[in-house]
Amino acid sequence: EEGTEAAAATAVVMELKSVGPSIAVFRADHPFIFLIQDNQSGNILFLGRVINPGQ
């Protein structure tokens, strides 16, 4: 392919509440890649990228 685009990883931020379990908040406000991986085999089942999460 001609040209490449860099993708940045996004951190997961934990917000603690006084009551109930903690909830992970994922803020996708910039390009990122993601994957779905099988826990037993470790195989990557799906790989994708989001170039413009605002759309």
Image (cartoon, grey):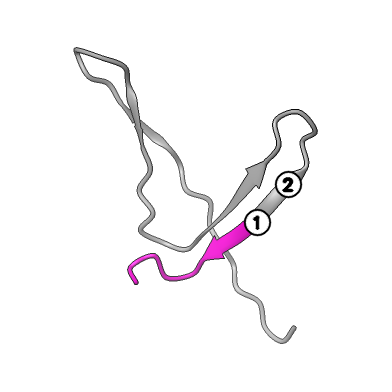
Instruction: Decide whether residue 6 is among the magenta residues.
Output: no
Q: Which residue is at 66% across, 77% downward?
A: 4
Indicate the position of residue 18 as horizontal and vertical percent values: 19, 13
Q: Along the horizontal axis of the image, is 2 left or right of 49?
A: right
Q: Looking at the image, is 28 positioned above or below residue 6?
A: above
Q: Which residue is at 67% across, 83% downward?
A: 3
Give the crowd class for mark 2: few <14, some 14-19, many >=20 residues within 10 Å.
Answer: few
Q: Of the numbered discs in the image, which one, if any, rests on residue 30? A: none
- Could you tell me which secondary element the residue under label 2 belongs to? strand
Q: Along the horizontal axis of the image, is 45 left or right of 29?
A: right
Indicate the position of residue 47 as horizontal and vertical percent values: 65, 56
Q: Quadrant of the N terminus?
A: bottom right
Which residue is labeled 2 in the image?
A: 44
Q: Looking at the image, is 50 positioned above or below residue 2?
A: above
Indicate the position of residue 33 as horizontal and vertical percent values: 57, 57
Query: For the view shown, which residue lies furthest in the bottom direction?
Result: 2
Instruction: Decide whether residue 54 is among the magenta residues.
Output: yes
Which quarter of the picture shows residue 48?
A: bottom right
Q: Which residue is at 71% across, 49% downward?
A: 45
- Could you tell me which secondary element the residue under label 1 belongs to? strand
Q: Are marks 2 and 1 in contact (CB under 8 Å)?
A: yes
- Which residue type carries mark 2? Ile
Question: What range of the chain is rendered magenta?
Answer: 47-55
- Which residue type carries mark 1? Leu
Give the crowd class for mark 1: few <14, some 14-19, many >=20 residues within 10 Å.
Answer: few
Query: For the view shown, which residue lies furthest in the top direction?
Result: 19
Query: For the view shown, which residue lies furthest in the left direction?
Result: 18
Tell me how far mark 2 sits from mark 1, CA to CA.
7 Å
Q: Looking at the image, is 28 positioned above or below residue 42?
A: below
Which residue is labeled 1 in the image?
A: 47
Q: Quadrant of the C terminus?
A: bottom left
Q: Looking at the image, is 30 positioned above or below residue 38?
A: below
